[in-house]
Image (spheres, rainbow, N blue to C red):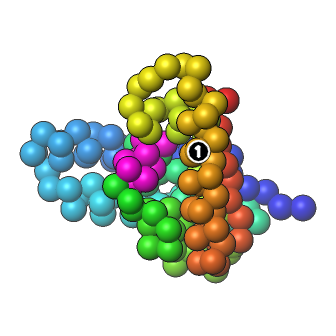
């Protein structure tokens, strides 16, 4: 039997720093994006360490890397940031480097992504076809994760 975190870790560092506040400041030009990147990596370490300390069998990055993981994945897929060196594999590798425990990658599911409108908003009747097309795209991402050594993937379908 093993335990695994299901859902997102709060995007607040142990010292009380809210990553969302840093992202707002960076977007407004009041802080460098490097500050956000550093805080996110610190938060990943905190989330991984807490999961290890709790005895989780698989750990994740706590889904803290992006404010909206589904929207971030849509942007990556639209930009071609996929496959063996794509967004999901890079995220998994960065987390796996933080621990000797098995690390699972959390992936938004195709229905959730389809509702975001990968090709833009459209006819709701087209949603099932878009979800099937995204499932095919995600199959390639899951294959890339497997080839990179990822032992488990947690598919989250918040919108299903």
Q: Which residue is mark 1?
A: 133
Quadrant location of the N terminus?
A: bottom right
Which of 38 and 104 lies nearest the eye of the viewer? 104
Outermost residue, left direction? Answer: 29
**What's the residue at 43%, 45% (across, down)?**
74
**What's the residue at 44%, 39% (across, down)?**
118
Residue 129 part of the magenta segment = no
Residue 27 position by quadrant:
top left
Q: Is residue 36 left or right of residue 95?
A: left
- How busy is the neighbourhood of tag 1: few (under 14 within 10 Å), some, or many (20 plus)? some
Secondary structure mostly taken by the magenta-highlighted segment of the chain: helix
Residue 72 sits above or below residue 159 on the image: below
The magenta span reads 70-78
Residue 91 sits above or below residue 96 on the image: above
Q: Is residue 120 left or right of residue 129?
A: left
Which of 78 and 152 lies nearest the eye of the viewer? 78
**What's the residue at 83%, 61% (across, down)?**
2
Residue 88 picture location, percent across and down: 50, 62
């Amino acid at each position: 039997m093993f335990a695994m975190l299901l859902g997102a870790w709060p995007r607040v560092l142990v010292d009380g720093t809210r990553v969302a506040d840093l992202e707002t400041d960076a977007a407004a030009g009041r802080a460098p994006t490097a500050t956000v990147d550093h805080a996110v990596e610190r938060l990943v370490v905190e989330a991984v360490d807490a999961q290890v300390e709790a005895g989780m069998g698989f750990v994740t990055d706590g889904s803290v890397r992006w404010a909206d993981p589904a929207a971030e994945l849509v942007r990556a897929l639209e930009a071609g940031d996929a496959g063996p060196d794509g967004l999901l594999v890079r995220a998994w590798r960065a987390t796996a480097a933080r621990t000797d425990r098995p690390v699972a990658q959390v992936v938004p599911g195709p229905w959730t992504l389809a509702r975001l409108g990968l090709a833009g908003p459209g006819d709701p009747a087209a949603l099932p076809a878009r979800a099937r097309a995204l499932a095919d795209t995600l199959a390639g991402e899951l294959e890339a994760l497997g080839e990179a050594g990822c032992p488990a993937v947690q598919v989250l379908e918040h919108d299903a």
